Amino acid sequence: MKDKQFLMIPGPTPVPERALLAMAKHPPGHRSPEFSAIMQEVYRDLKWLFRTEEDVFVYTSSGTGAMEAAIFNLVNPGDKVLSLVMGNFSERWAKIARTRGAEVESINFDWGRAVDPAVLKQRLEQDVNREIKFVTLIHNETSTGVTNDLQALTAIIKEHGALSIVDGVTSVGAIPVKMDEWGIDVLVSGSQKGFMIPPGLAFLACSKKAWAVHEKCQNPSFYFNFVAYKKSVDENTTPYTPNVSLIAALKETLDMMKEEGLENIYGRHAKLACMVRNGVKRLGLKLFVEDDATGSNVITSICPPEGISVPDIRKTLNKDYDIVVANGQGKLKDRIFRIGHLGFVSERDVITALGALEESIKKLKPSFTAL
Amino acid sequence: MKDKQFLMIPGPTPVPERALLAMAKHPPGHRSPEFSAIMQEVYRDLKWLFRTEEDVFVYTSSGTGAMEAAIFNLVNPGDKVLSLVMGNFSERWAKIARTRGAEVESINFDWGRAVDPAVLKQRLEQDVNREIKFVTLIHNETSTGVTNDLQALTAIIKEHGALSIVDGVTSVGAIPVKMDEWGIDVLVSGSQKGFMIPPGLAFLACSKKAWAVHEKCQNPSFYFNFVAYKKSVDENTTPYTPNVSLIAALKETLDMMKEEGLENIYGRHAKLACMVRNGVKRLGLKLFVEDDATGSNVITSICPPEGISVPDIRKTLNKDYDIVVANGQGKLKDRIFRIGHLGFVSERDVITALGALEESIKKLKPSFTAL
């Protein structure tokens, strides 16, 4: 049905009406006192959301832009980077670091598995001369639906002395991420996820330890340069014309998040994930990530039932029930489909998705019966 | 009056209702057939607007992001760049090129003056060994309200053999820019200007000659890399999650621009500029750019009348008449104010602004009488 489509992909995610209406307003001037007042609140609330005392920079870019910002502001050509890879997005760190001329060593884990802290610990213990300067990793690997034990991993990295550079694109604002308490050095995220607004803004916070490394880095970026953004935070502005409309929308959703409360947000995502996992199992389908401890609270990867293809499931859900779910990525394309339950999603949405999934499977395979 | 503010600054510029309402819709998935259909139209229409057969890349970034893309995809450290500077924005090219490690030589022209083609010609003729590989310049210098004779300048650069890298941020879609016919090698622009949508997207097109130079460049950017964007244009997509809401709005404004017609758009901006210049002179105020041939069609810089400060004029226009005009930038701060007449602006808006300007001056200086 036209204009009825509902996204249950890992991003863009549904946007609340308050934010949509903020975007429909005439854009304010970015150098006005009115806009500075908005920026001041946004900068303050982002610190709350990132659980950090450090400044959070706001880039007008995709999440990948903030990843580039992290690498380019810290890593010099020839620096040794250890990259923990278990999917498409965690691998992106390695690609960007190589683009920057770093000496990148990847440790690959099976797609669908989390990073094994013991493997990381062993590798870093071997690095007796402390040659590894950075470890890149992801909190929630969106391409597989796996969440790493970020607290354990950052503790191991901290003990070694390297800097942890963390992709929190689909975790910040949805599952617990405690930047300061866990000792994360660099944390990046993107707007079209837990932040509940459309894509176009990216966020980055860095620790004092990371800042000291930045100061010795021959930063090759003008647009993403930490120094310019740091100065702008102090002045409640941005270095270049930002996406003022998205920032106005972000102010609305940050207000909503404060009203709901962080623990409630985390709890809601945990509950939604539990509902999806149980519902999928009840339908007799196989979860791609069977281990509940590493299955993501924001996206669930599902193997199609015998005799039904992923494209057919996605097409039926979309065409007949106006629900969009994601395909697998890379080597998982057509092997799994992924249901996003991230951001502005309620229990009603999950019930809807599970009901529509059951109906779709029945249509495609009339002999199908749920468990 | 609350929510009544009207922007007459050089960006963000007013946004038509059609585009605002497109932004208020739920964002589409960026990997959906529906969104690819939008991208296909947008890519096609951007070529029409840039007057080029080359692809136009769409970056989710500020205009400065596309400037970084241009430099990083073409210039290697040590390359010799000639930078034509006559204001804050033309100077940005030199800064970005220096960040990239280029050997930058600036030719500075007085703020308020256009680049003198004879000076450029003479400098390039001296370069008998063709050491200068790139010339950076701006079409319309937003900080002063001066438009360069881009056709003449690119012809001189072409004859020398260097690549022309042009900031068309406030010119594309407002005043004539003929990329292919004039032989522009790289042309960048930004969404919150002639494109009539909020900030957050930037555009870049490059000639075949520039592409050949790109292929020999050790591009240090992942996020802005030409190759990834070129591939995406061919597939009607973008390499990373783009600002889908702004792109949906852009489709609306490109449709509006096609309905109006390019020559009519150029004519409208020329007429608005003429009205502003005449109106300002009629009020007995001094134009900062007195030469009609170089005065910009999209922004007019005005010297405040004797005894009235720029902040007072801006404050009165804003507070009493809900109109925002811009201050001068850098060394022109508080020496000029700037009225933008760029994008979704009609004659009615100019009449309004001139009327409010007259009333503001009368308030601030009761003895004032127009000529």
Image (cartoon, coloured by chain):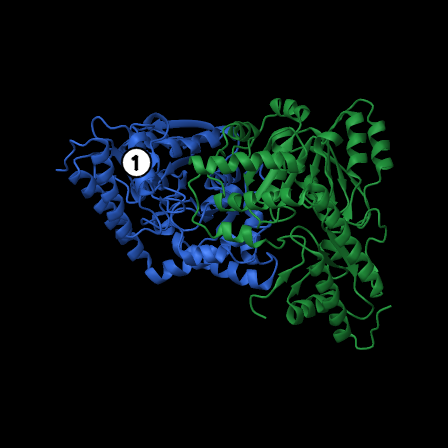
Chain colours: A blue, B green
Dot 1, how many residues are within 10 Å of its Cα: few (below 14), some (14-19), or many (20+)? many
Which quadrant of the view contains residue B90? top right
Q: Could you say whether the residue bearing mark 1 is in a helix, strand or loop?
A: helix
Judging depth in this view, the residue of B103 and B110 nearest the camera is B110
Quadrant containing the C terminus of chain B in the rendered view = bottom right
Point out residue B124 in the picture as x, y percentages from the top left corner.
82, 29
Q: Nearer the viewer, residue A359 or B309?
A: A359
**In the figure, B317 relative to A323: above or below?**
below
Q: Quadrant of residue A163?
A: top left
Left or right: A162, with A102 as reference point: left
Q: Residue furthest bottom?
A: B366
Q: Residue at x 84, y 37 (%)?
A: B117
Quadrant showing the N terminus of chain B: bottom right
Judged left or right of residue A309, residue A2 is right
Instruction: Estimate the x, y position of residue A233 in percent, counting from the top left.
Output: 53, 55
Residue depicted at 51% across the width and 61% down the height: A38
State the residue in front, B93 or A166.
B93
Q: Is residue A225 visible?
A: no
Q: x, y percentage for residue A291?
A: 21, 37
The residue beneath circle 1 is A316
Q: In front: B104, or A46?
A: A46
Residue B336: % across, % down: 76, 59
Q: Chain of mark 1?
A: A
Snapshot quadrant of residue A155: top left
Give the amino acid type for the residue marked by disc 1 in the picture. Answer: Thr
